Amino acid sequence: MPNLSKITSDHDVIRNWAEERGAKPSHVKRTGSRDDIGVLRLDFPGYGGEGTLEPITWEQFFEKFDERKLALVYEDETASGQKSNFNKLISAETAAASTRKSAGHASKRGSSAVAKKRGTSARNASKAAKRPAAKKAAPKKSAAKKTRPAARKKASSTGGRRTAAKRASRKTASKKSSAKKSSAAKRRR
């Protein structure tokens, strides 16, 4: 079985997965305060957590887990079929985005077979599959957009003069404001 990552926020699933591997709930020493545990971790025996991790109870672990709105990314097996210890705590928001993203990838993977039959790329086939039927039949860009460059040229030729006039009025306004500032500074002295 390939090593597919899973995501969960279910306390029972997390606890069972960790206990099957001998992992204990813990936190990283010196990352918290009196009121806060700090960085949460699962400590696997013999994997270098000694000295940096401190055990906590499952109740403390899940209290902070829920408070921080976390999720656990984990794997059951490695690519070679062995029990995997891979895990990572992430925000539930990131987990939700990852789930939506992977669902999109699944539809793209499924569309590659359809694309081969139609002679199109998988990317184009997945885009077409996501579009509503009404949009598929929509006509290409209208001719009105093609005439815009000419309209822009005309506007820019007259706009250039307007811009020069605006620049001149800005210079005058700037001179007036600097004169006001200098006279105000003289009055203060």
Image (tube, grey):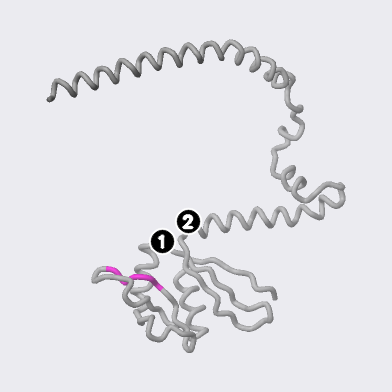
Marks 1/2: CA distance?
Answer: 8 Å
The image quadrant of residue 151 is top right
Q: Which mark is residue 146?
A: none
Residue 62 in the figure: left or right of residue 108: left
The image quadrant of residue 78 is bottom right
Q: Quadrant of the C terminus?
A: top left
- Relative to 102, is 73 above or below? below
On the image, the x and y values in percent for residue 99 come to 57, 58
Reply yes or no: does residue 161 show up in magenta: no
Which residue is rendered at x = 65% and y = 73% of the image?
A: 3
- Between 159 and 44, the one lying in front of the other is 159
Element at label 1: loop
Amino acid carrying label 1: it is: Lys
Residue at the outermost bottom position: 46
Main structural element of the magenta stretch: helix, strand or loop?
A: loop
- Between 171 and 155, the one lying in front of the other is 171
Which residue is rendered at x = 70% and y = 76% of the image?
A: 1
Label 2: few (<14), some (14–19) or many (≥20) C-alpha neighbours in 10 Å = few
Q: Which residue is mark 2?
A: 93
On the image, the x and y values in percent for residue 30 come to 31, 75
Q: Which residues are magenta?
A: 36-40
Q: Which residue is mark 1?
A: 69
Instruction: Say which label, 1 or 2, has the lower sequence index.
Output: 1
